[in-house]
Amino acid sequence: MDILTGLFISVFLVFLPLGQLMRIPFQGFTIVGLDAVVCLTAIVWIIKTFKKWEKPKLLFLPVSIFLAAGIFSLLANVMWLSGNELFISWLYLVRLASFMAFLWIAKEISKRSPALMQKLLLVGGGIVMVLGLLQYIFFPSLQPYLYLGWDNHFYRVFSTFLDPNFVGAFLVLYFFYLAFLLLQNYQHQQKRWLFGMISFLSLLAVFLTYSRSAYLMLGVGIVISLWSLGQKKLILGAVGILAVIILLFGVFHRYGEGNNLLRTVSIESRLGSMTTALTIFTKEPVFGTGFDSYRYAQRRYGFLGGNIWEATHAGAGTSNSFLFVLATTGIVGFGAYFFLLYSLFQQAKVISKKNKLWGVLLCVSLFSLCVDALFENTLFYPSIMLWIFTLIGIASP
């Protein structure tokens, strides 16, 4: 086993399951274990690849264009960002590039050992799910850690991500992957039962997040899946069953405001966050405030203050991935990111021609994730970026 493969395995079996638990504050920002190892893996891959003077072919142009837009957005804002703020913003851009590099890293390793790649996704996602269910039972609240900037999330699955909305989106993606494995191995009785049971547990974990954006993401994904697989007659029944289950969870599991599916506090918070992002976008509409200087932009324009402006987790992003791109990279960056998303969907169509199940999985994952991204900044959440880019890398010919 070479160093690159070993690092890749450690990412999925150790650092992805650890989520946000391995965090080290340092000079105004936080080093997360997953981010650090992903960056190290990308560096090893770059050294290995460019020694041979090989340029990746898979989606290289759209990825490069968006990263270039991120670089220009920072260069356009060097006059108001302090040296330390500029350095930290550059680190976020390096992190983004490292996660995107898993497109090519996953493809390379998958060519040598495709079975290993599928097992890593199965086990890594499964650990996150199991830890979430155990957390719900034995550690139902983050109240002891409110001083660190986390919300309470009383009796909600937040797992090692420490956020029910992000882990909810991740678990929905994991459920779609399990459904893919179930269909792929349906003739094998033992695997059918195994994947069926894990799918049930993953759905249970999703429902226990009480994340309405994850519920919507799940519903949209199920509809697209059934439509793509030619099972249109099942759509109405599936949506009805899903609605009844969500209603039952909302009625019989009320432990506070977080379990109230009709809660309005979070809606108002999201609307306020989106309004802030739009306001910041109007200040710097062409290149934005710089990727990712959003925390400093909020402080500059008076949306963040007090002694905890550097610590609060709400300061680093907004409740909408598309508005986040607009605010930090402007119209130029938004156009580049739209081109990247378009290219990802096109790649899914290419894959679908050779393997329909893989193509459906990728289209469903991408589209449902874009729906969720209207309410949370999930498109730029590290664990979710890792999952999506790895999936596309594995499936790509």
Image (spheres, rainbow, N blue to C red):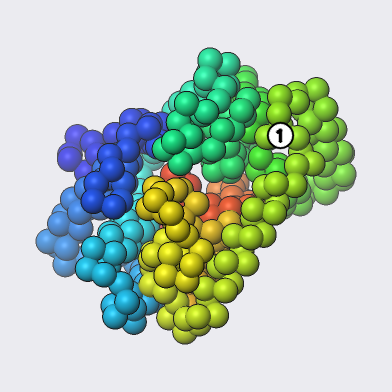
User: Helix, strand or loop at disc 1?
Assistant: helix
Judging depth in this view, the residue of 267 and 238 nearest the camera is 267
Say which quarter of the image contains residue 198: top right
Judging depth in this view, the residue of 108 and 269 nearest the camera is 269
Q: Position of residue 137 (x, y in %)?
A: 58, 16
Quadrant position of the C terminus in the picture: bottom left
User: Looking at the image, which residue sits at the far left?
Assistant: 51
State left or right for residue 63 relative to residue 153: left
Q: Identify the residue shown where x is 29% and y is 52%.
A: 28
Q: Position of residue 65 (x, y in %)?
A: 38, 75
Q: Is residue 295 above or below residue 259?
A: below
State left or right for residue 141 relative to residue 120: right
Say which quarter of the image contains residue 180: top right
State left or right for residue 10 relative to residue 349: left
> Amino acid under label 1?
Glu
User: Looking at the image, which residue sits at the far front?
Assistant: 306
Q: Is residue 273 above or below residue 108?
A: below
Q: Position of residue 358 (x, y in %)?
A: 55, 48
Q: Identify the residue shown where x is 16% and y is 67%.
A: 53
State left or right for residue 6 relative to residue 189: left
Q: Identify the residue shown where x is 46% and y is 48%.
A: 313
Q: Identify the residue shown where x is 76% and y is 38%.
A: 261
Say which quarter of the image contains residue 259: top right
Judging depth in this view, the residue of 121 and 211 nearest the camera is 211
Quadrant position of the N terminus in the picture: top left
Q: Position of residue 17 (x, y in %)?
A: 41, 31
Task: Tell me, yes or no, if residue 305 can be seen here.
Answer: yes
Please state the total of marks drawn on the protein image: 1
Residue designated by label 1: 257
Task: Tell me, yes or no, if residue 340 can be seen here.
Answer: no
Crowd class of label 1 (few under 14; some 14 to 19; many from 20; radius 10 Å): some
